[in-house]
Each structure stands twice: as C-alpha cells, then as structure tokens.
C-alpha cells in the first residue's frame, strides 16, 4: 500500500501557490493538465546552475563545462530510471512532447511510410499527435486513420481492431486523455499492434507525471512526455525509443553536436543520444527536470495517483448535485485526475471567467483536441485537473463556487 500524500504540507514548497491573485483571491490552481507549478527545489537547482556551474556541455575541457556536462547527463540517468529505460542513450532530450512526436514522425515516418501505408490514431489525440502524422502522410502518400471511443469515453476496442490491418505501420496514441481523463489500455493496444507488425508510439504526457511508467513493461517502441507537466521547466521533453530503432533512423535536425565527422562532401551522424540533440541543448532545463523528478519520487507516484483519483471522485460527486452539468468521460474507475465538463445553456468561457474572478484557475476551450470535441458535439469544454499540491478543501470550495456561478448564469 502506498503512503498517503500530505498535499497541505507539500503546498509550502511551491511559492506561486502562497499568494493572492486576481481580485486578491487565494489561488486555487486546477490547470495542471496544461502545466504544473514549480517547487522551490526545482527553482533552486536551475538558479544554482546559472550562478555556479553553467557552461555549454560536451564541448569544453574546462571545469565549468565538465560540471555542467555531468549535471546534464545525470538528469538523463534520472529520466532513465523514472521510466525504467534499458539504456541511458535511448533517452533523448527534446523541446517537449510536441517536438518528440515531430522527431519520430519525420525521422521514422519519412523513412518507413509510403503510399498505401496507414498510421492509426485515436479520435482523442492531442493535436501534437495528429498534425505531425498528417504532415508526414501528405508527404509520403500514407493515410491517417482514427479509432473511435465509446459513449462513455473508453477506447472502442472493436473499432480499433477493425481499423488495425496489415497496412498499419504505426499506432500512435495517448496513455491518458487530456480531455476525458480516460486511462487507455496501453499494453493491450501495443500487443494488438504487434500482431500486424506495427510500430507504436505512446504519448505519455498525461501519464508519466501521475503514474509509475515502465517502458519495458509496456513494450512500446517510442514513449514521449514533457517536463513542464511533472513540475519541471518548459522547453524540455523526452523521447525514449528502442536503441535499434533510434540507430536506424536518420537525424531529424542538423548542426552542432549531432555529428561525428563533417566534410565538404557530407557528414556522418554521431552516436546516440547526440545524434538527435543538435545544437546547444536545454542544459539548465534538463537539470531542472532532474530535480523535479527527484521531488516527485520523494512524494511517490502511487501516492500521487491515489490522491488525484480521490480528488476527482470527490469533485464528480459534488458536480452530480448541479443541475444541467454533464461530466465528460468515463467512470472514476477508468479515469485519471482530470474532470472535464459542460453545463447546458452556459458558455464554458463564461464559467471560466467567473470562476477566475473567484480565484479558481481552470482550463476552457478545445484543449488541443478539436476532433474529439467535434465527435462530442461540442466546441469547447471546461477542465479541472489536479496534481500533488491540490487539496480536498480546494475541491469543496471549487464545487461551491461552481454551483453559485452556474446558478447565476442560468
């Protein structure tokens, strides 16, 4: 049994949460699905690097460069352990989940896709896992296919199996929906993809910060996630890929660091991971990410998952009392700490504005998932998403404010 999380105590580690914001209301931050806040430990780690050890990495033999290089590579090892990657050099630092997917789509996709081939996605995907495949499909003659979801927000396995075929060369899907909160059956999807010889990419941006992730247990080919959703800085993300696959792929970007030799006739790429880390990398951001992961590990991912599920369940119970409010997505059993909703006859934007005036920060819009919202018959929805520093008291206060705002607008 995992240890219980003390959110009230953890809040003291986050400077931004200890302040009053709009109209001098105490901040209640429920927009963690978009981006989390930073603990002092991460701020200090990045600040310390800038003050004491910053230099470009892997390019100098002076003391500062060696210190920065060691810290940068230590962060890579921390990520490797977090996701249980077999090899350190399979962990590629990118600018974020979006860049990581673009890297795979352009490097692997343009090499392996051709006319008649298909890329199978789900209708729930974030635009970051749709648009890059559409771009590559347009360039290669391949086709992008979408598997549907059921009325209660689960992946329609019958539809997925019907659309999985010998033409399917890549199955790219999210581990957790950033709108519905649905936890997808990652291992089952990957096993099904293997039956037709398709490669797999898991968008784990909403999974890695909230649940233990084991890429070897998943048996995926590629896994991607972002630093800013796991208490780290923006501008840093991770691509993990099987070593053999990464070695077979051409470099995505050209420039410094990613080469072994360059002549006037051409170049030979460097070894992994440098091959996919062209130019000056996100040095301080990587160090900040390492500090963020160490903080999360101290709290415990199983404890975080249990805490978020408790908060989601508490909010869903309170929302059931609000007339005309509809919760999107599955039952609590199949859900993460994300609760999206709409209210009959009330514009989501109006709800968000009035809640913001009371100090509640939630997300409103299509959440970079237009195809899913179209399927749901919606243009926008509201989303409350939790993390380790959110409390049951905040949920209760939010539910009361939400009920009052709905009553005012209807």
Image: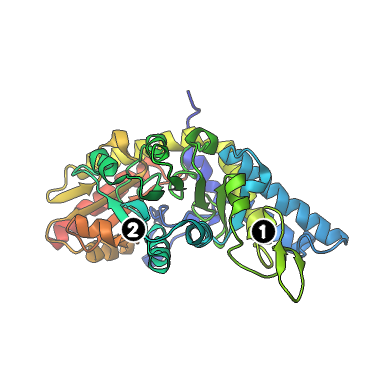
Identity of the residue drawn at 51% across and 38% down: 213
Dot placed on the residue nearer the N-terminal end, 2 or 1: 2
Residue at the spot of label 1: 275
Residue in the foreground of this view, choosing between 214 and 351: 214
Residue 358 visible in this rendered orientation of the protein: no
Identity of the residue drawn at 22% across and 64% down: 379
Q: Is residue 190 above or below residue 116?
A: above
Is disc 1 placed on a helix, strand or loop? Answer: helix
Residue at the spot of label 2: 144
Label 2 to label 1: alpha-carbon separation: 28 Å
Q: Report crowding for label 1: few under 14, some 14 to 19, many 20 or more residues within 10 A (C-alpha).
A: many
Q: Is residue 200 above or below residue 135?
A: above
Residue 248: image location, x then y, percent: 60, 52
Residue in the foreground of this view, choosing between 259 and 273: 259
Is disc 2 placed on a helix, strand or loop? Answer: strand
Q: Is residue 24 left or right of residue 14?
A: left
Residue 403: image location, x then y, percent: 20, 51
Residue 201: image location, x then y, percent: 46, 48
Q: Is residue 269 left or right of residue 118?
A: right
């Amino acid at each position: 049994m995992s240890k219980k999380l003390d959110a009230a105590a953890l809040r003291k580690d986050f400077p931004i949460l200890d302040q009053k914001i709009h109209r001098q209301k105490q901040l209640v931050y429920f927009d963690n699905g978009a981006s989390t806040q930073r603990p002092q430990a991460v701020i200090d780690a990045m600040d310390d690097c800038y003050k004491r050890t910053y230099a470009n990495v892997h390019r100098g033999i002076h003391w500062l460069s060696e210190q920065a290089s060691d810290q940068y590579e230590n962060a890579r090892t921390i990520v490797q352990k977090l996701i249980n990657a077999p090899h350190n050099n399979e962990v590629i630092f990118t600018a974020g989940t979006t860049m990581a997917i673009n890297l795979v789509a352009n490097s692997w996709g343009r090499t392996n896709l051709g006319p008649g081939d298909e890329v199978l996605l789900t209708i729930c995907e974030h635009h970051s896992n749709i648009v890059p495949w559409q771009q590559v499909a347009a360039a290669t003659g391949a086709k992008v296919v979408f598997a549907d979801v059921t009325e209660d927000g689960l992946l329609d396995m019958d539809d997925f199996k019907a659309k999985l075929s010998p033409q399917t060369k890549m199955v790219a899907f999210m581990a957790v929906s950033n709108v519905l909160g649905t936890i997808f059956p990652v291992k089952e999807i990957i096993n099904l993809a293997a039956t037709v010889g398709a490669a797999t990419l898991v968008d784990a941006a909403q999974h890695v910060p909230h649940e233990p992730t084991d890429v070897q247990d998943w048996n995926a080919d590629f896994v991607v996630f972002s630093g800013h959703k796991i208490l780290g800085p923006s501008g840093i993300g991770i691509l993990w890929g099987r070593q053999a696959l990464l070695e077979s792929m051409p470099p995505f970007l050209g420039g410094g660091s990613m080469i072994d030799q360059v002549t006037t006739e051409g170049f030979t790429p460097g070894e992994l991971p440098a091959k996919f880390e062209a130019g000056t990398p996100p040095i301080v951001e990587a160090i900040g990410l390492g500090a963020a992961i160490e903080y999360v590990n101290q709290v415990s991912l199983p404890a975080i998952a249990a805490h978020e599920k408790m908060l989601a369940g508490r909010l869903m119970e309170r929302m059931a009392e609000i007339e005309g409010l509809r919760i999107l997505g599955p039952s609590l059993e199949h859900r993460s700490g994300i609760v999206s909703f709409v209210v009959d006859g009330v514009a989501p934007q109006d709800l968000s504005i009035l809640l913001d005036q009371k100090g509640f920060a939630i997300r409103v819009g299509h959440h970079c998932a237009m195809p899913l919202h179209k399927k749901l018959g919606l243009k926008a929805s509201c989303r409350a998403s939790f993390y380790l520093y959110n409390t049951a008291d905040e949920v209760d206060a939010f539910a009361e404010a939400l009920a009052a705002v709905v009553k005012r607008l209807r």
